[in-house]
Image (cartoon, rainbow, N blue to C red):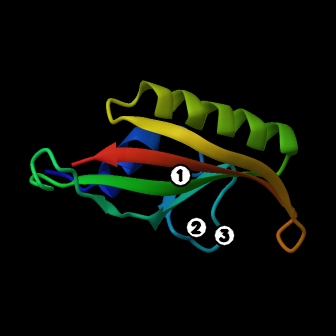
Amino acid sequence: MNTIQEQLFAQLSGLAAGGVYPIVAEQNAVYPYLVYQRVASPVENTLDGNGNPPINNTRFQIDAWDLTYGGAVTLAAAVKAAMSSWGVPNVQLHEHDQYEADVKAFRIVMDFSVWHA
């Protein structure tokens, strides 16, 4: 069985011409690209089943990067569509825009709550 990170990678693959990267993009990555990271992953124990199997509620941050704001917005919309169609229950918690002056690129930061075994 694949980890939830591997499943997320598979769900996002193909959305960005520059690729999908865990935690940090490779040096000189081609735009547009996505970066994802696991922000928190608590195990939710329930009385029904006493946590067997455990239910995990992993929060992922997914960043859509591009050289133009419009490109970043378009890529973020593709991410939201991919997450909506994913067979793993999830909900978007947060989204905000950033401009990273040091690399002269735009970034849309999205947080998703993902429920999985």
At label 3, counting other C-alpha atoms closer than 10 Å, the crowd grade (few under 14, some 14-19, many 20 or more) is few
Mark 2 and mark 1 lie on one chain; the one further toward the N terminus is: 1
Q: Amino acid at mark 3?
A: Asn
Q: Amino acid at mark 2?
A: Ala
| Disc ID at residue 11 | none
Q: Quadrant of residue 13?
A: top left
Secondary structure at numbered mark 1: loop
- The Cα–Cα distance between marks 3 and 1, rounded to whole angstroms, is 12 Å
Secondary structure at numbered mark 3: loop
Residue drawn at point x = 57 percent, y = 40 percent? 92
Q: Amino acid at mark 1?
A: Gly
| Disc ID at residue 25 | 2
For the residues labelled 2 and 1, say whether their Cβ atoms are less than 8 Å apart. Answer: yes
Residue that lies at the very extreme toward the front in this rendered image: 47
The residue identified by callout 3 is: 28
Secondary structure at numbered mark 2: loop
The residue identified by callout 1 is: 19
Residue closer to the observer: 49 or 98: 49
At label 2, counting other C-alpha atoms closer than 10 Å, the crowd grade (few under 14, some 14-19, many 20 or more) is some
Q: Give the number of marks.
A: 3
